[in-house]
Amino acid sequence: MNNKEAVIRTSGVTKIYDSGEIQVEALRGINLVIKPGELVAIMGASGSGKSTMLNILGCLDYPSGGDYHLDGIHINNLDRDQLADIRNKKIGFVFQGFNLLARTSAFENVELPLLYSRRQEIGDLEQLTRQALERVGLGDRTHHFPNQLSGGQQQRVAIARALVNHPAIVLADEPTGNLDTRTSIEIMATFQELNRQGITIILVTHEHDIADYCKRIIEFRDGHIIRDQEVAHPRDAHRDLETGQFQISGLGERP
Amino acid sequence: MKWKNLIKVAFKSIVKNKMRTLLTMLGIIIGVAAVIVMVAIGKGAEKRIQDQIASMGTNLIMVYPGSMQSRGVRMGADSGVRLSLDDVDRLKKTATLIDAVSPVVRTGVQVIGGSGNWNTIVYGGSEQYLEIRDWDLTSGDNFTANDIRAQNKICVIGQTIVKNLFPDEDPVGQQLRLRNVPFKVIGILKERGQNAFGMDQDDVIIAPYSTVLYRLSGHVHINQIIARASSLEQMKAAQVEITAIMRESHKLPEGEDDDFTVRNQTDIASTAQETTQVLTILLASIASISLLVGGIGIMNIMLVSVTERTHEIGIRMAIGARSRDILVQFLIEAIVLSLSGGLIGVLIGFGATWIVHQATGWNTVIAPQNVFLSFGFAGAVGIFFGYYPARKAAALNPIEALRYE
Ligand SMILES: Nc1ncnc2c1ncn2[C@@H]1O[C@H](COP(=O)(O)OP(=O)(O)O)[C@@H](O)[C@H]1O
Ligand SMILES: [Mg+2]
């Protein structure tokens, strides 16, 4: 297979956390190919290695072994600065806890990746920032501070920040983990909308009802992939919001 | 990352944390203000001494008994060697580079007259004494060579004597009793104020040296000889000439040390200036210490803020900030903080200097180079003490920084 075709290609990726006496094998040889336009859910019990995988895919951490190609670039051999540039250009990261800068307006939070960009011709920063905020439906909230926004709105700001540099892929680690049911579905609606526009998205979740909105589900256990299947008919978050169907399904009320 | 953007990011961070910004700057503000005020006071004292030495009289040359070492320690002052009127005569007759000379005989007396009594110092001099000291009269006359020959009991008096003994009447023509010897006041000196050492120069009586020597002092030697060089350019030559004449007068064989000391204003000025320069350096170093403490304050708060902002640094790295971007951001923050602290410190220093001047009447001089120096020093302090915390911030691992709460 051609590397260029896949956004993400890993072969035999391992991660060992070595803290002196104890060694934790968080990933034990992951082979994964993600193609453009996919909407993937990574599932698995707590401690199964989901976040570790996402951090490596997001170039926040180095794998201990194996190879990782992102958008055709062999990541293993890059230094700190090159990884920083990859994170800036090719990856949009969305966290469970939003990770917005405090006392900094939505606009300034979203603009930040553009400020760190090393691209020569990047365009009009203000226009790019505004476009990203509009894509997540926050065109009217640009000058609010994080503490003036609801959790769902904060996560939208974080998604806008992830989008602003037009990355090859958006990675989200439990993006709905801190949100109530309705807001979670709203965020999934946003992800589905962005995916329809062609953005490749991988999100980590341990909730089946969230994974049901994705086109592909990968399940982790003890650092292995134990299941990887396409979903024939993903749920439509927009429709669920309109019909209010998610309430009947009892999402979010599980222990 | 582009410089413009880095500066933007650093400024936003500064504006966002007003309390931290203020606390960080406070040390620098106080340090710079202290340097400005203290140096201004020291420089003011220097200038005041310079002015007063200039007011002592132009082209003034002084001869003291005993040899004086270069650092101003007088040696052999009590070795019995005296200056005599013969020395004065000889200088008057043979010296070609001076146009006036006078002995100085000094003695403390109690004065009775006018409305009470007063303790002061009587200076005995020749009719050229006032001319050499560049001192004018406000009324009356100076005494003459005839008065000296005749040992007339007349005098001119300073303003402090006038104020204390003749507050409401014209002293000219009045009688004063100096150690019970009656003297007639014939002239009044112009006000001179304090000298460089804080002594009231107007608290004096000046009389013919012959009268002071033979009717008043009880001793027959003179304390000092003063002379005026015919021109400023001839100053050094005049001193050499005076030295030669004095050696001849004292019959000193070749190879033997002088038993007298010839000095001019510049020597005295440089001694006084050295003293005040020491004062300025002392004040400046005290103030520099506070600037240093201010710098350590910057480092302290920047270090705390690295810990406090670890999570923020993680976020910045996660969205693509390089280590160098973080380093430069922290450095810019430190430099901007210390430079704006420096600027505020300069302004407060100006204000405080003015207040000190108003409150105490001390001379103050704000030299531009000191302002630039302390401002520049503040910037250097920012870079120096900002670098370590900035390095620490830049070296953080993005994943660990993000996990930090
Ligand atoms: N920084 C770390 N140091 C040591 N062990 C870690 C570290 N991060 C994660 N682990 C371990 O690696 C395993 C996988 O963790 P993680 O990827 O966070 O799982 P998940 O996100 O699926 O809950 C766990 O056993 C966890 O304890
Ligand atoms: Mg996790």
Image (cartoon, coloured by chain):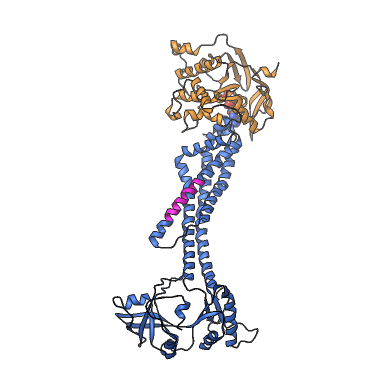
Chain colours: A orange, B blue
The quarter of the image that holds ligand 1 is top right
User: Can you tell which quarter of the image residue A215 is in?
Assistant: top right
Residue B80 seen by the camera: no
* Residue B328 lies in the magenta stretch: no
Residue B127 located left or right of residue A124: left
The correct choice, above or below, for B326 with respect to A233 in the image is below
The correct choice, above or below, for B328 with respect to B248 in the image is above
Q: Specify the farthest residue to the right.
A: A1
Residue B366 located left or right of residue A122: left
Which residue is nearer to you in this view: B238 or B363?
A: B238
Q: Position of residue B260 (x, y in %)?
A: 56, 82
Q: Position of residue B162 (x, y in %)?
A: 34, 77
Q: Main secondary structure of the magenta part?
A: helix
User: Can you tell which quarter of the image residue B170 is in?
Assistant: bottom left
The correct choice, above or below, for A154 with respect to B119 in the image is above
Residue B170 seen by the camera: yes
User: Can you tell which quarter of the image residue B135 is in?
Assistant: bottom left
Which residue is nearer to you in this view: A14 or B289?
A: B289
Q: Position of residue B116 (x, y in %)?
A: 30, 80
* Residue B343 lies in the magenta stretch: yes
Magenta stretch: give its range. Answer: B338-352
Which residue is nearer to you in this view: A235 or B321?
A: B321
Count of labels in the image: 0
The correct choice, above or below, for B224 with respect to B276 in the image is below
Residue B340 located left or right of residue A122: left
**Which quadrant: the N terminus of chain B?**
top right
Q: Position of residue A210 (x, y in %)?
A: 52, 16
